[in-house]
Amino acid sequence: MTQCQLYLISPLDVSGAFPARLAKAIDAGNGLVTAFQFRVKDVEQHEAAGFAEPLQEICAERDVAFIVNDSIPLAKRLGADGIHLGQQDGSPKDAREALGLEAQIGVTCHASRHLAMTAGEQGADYVAFGAFFPSSTKETEHRAEPELIEWWSKIFEIPSVAIGGITPENCAPLVEAGADFLAICGAVWKGDEQAAIKAFLERL
């Protein structure tokens, strides 16, 4: 079984001391954090690019993939490592054309086998399933079960990301089901980021 890794998602506010917190969180993981998703809402592109710059630098220095949420134009502008697409954000095919062959393209698939298979056919590099638990970060209308990840990992080579309310205390069933990545946000940023990452490290 491959080692399950952490995929950090930014809080909506990445101003102020956030870059320092990101660096601390990644460093506390000792290589466990391999991707970071830059997720800001209702910020125009120029301002978003300004927020992204120091975070992208921190990720590059630590060999962590810098993934932009939703916006293909912003990902292109930043030369990001990849993009995470919601179901309304365009297809992996469009993203690939805009961002090139090297870009990592992920797709939100909620709790749907059909959406995941479609994403795979369209060239996604990973699929994200969830929410597995109630999340304080985002309204969740779709609930997924660990069996979905188990089914996916037995049939498909494309990595899966589990998302939604994941904490060090509840992540074990997802890891056992074969999730390649745990996407985490609130569990890290709502408290001491170093302690949270260390707690995940112990579990994984």
Image (spheres, rainbow, N blue to C red):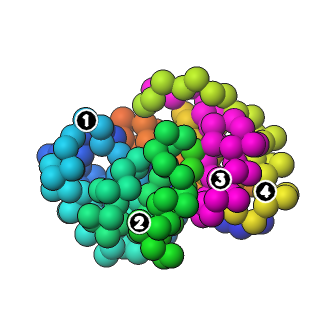
Q: In this view, does 43 lie to the left or right of 94?
A: left
The tag on residue 153 is: 4
First-in-chain label (4 vs 2): 2
- The C terminus - image quarter: bottom right
Q: Mark 2 points at which residue?
A: 98
Q: How crowded is mark 4: few (under 14 residues within 10 Å), some or many (20 or more)?
A: some
Helix, strand or loop at mark 1: loop
Mark pair 1, 2: CA separation: 22 Å
Q: Mark 3 points at which residue?
A: 119
Please state which of residues 48 and 199 is positioned toward the viewer in this rendering: 48
Q: Residue at x 19, y 44 (%)?
A: 44
Mark pair 4, 3: CA separation: 15 Å
Helix, strand or loop at mark 4: helix
Please state which of residues 112 and 24 is positioned toward the viewer in this rendering: 112
Helix, strand or loop at mark 2: helix
Q: Residues within 10 Å of mark 1 (few under 14, many from 20)?
A: few
Single out the mark in the foreground, 4 or 1.
1
First-in-chain label (1 vs 2): 1
Above or below residue 198? Residue 186 is above
First-in-chain label (2 vs 3): 2
Residue 89: x %, y % from top left: 46, 45
Q: What residue type is labelled 3?
A: Ala
Residue 24 appears in the figure: no
Q: Name the residue under label 1.
A: 42
Residue 74: x %, y % from top left: 30, 56
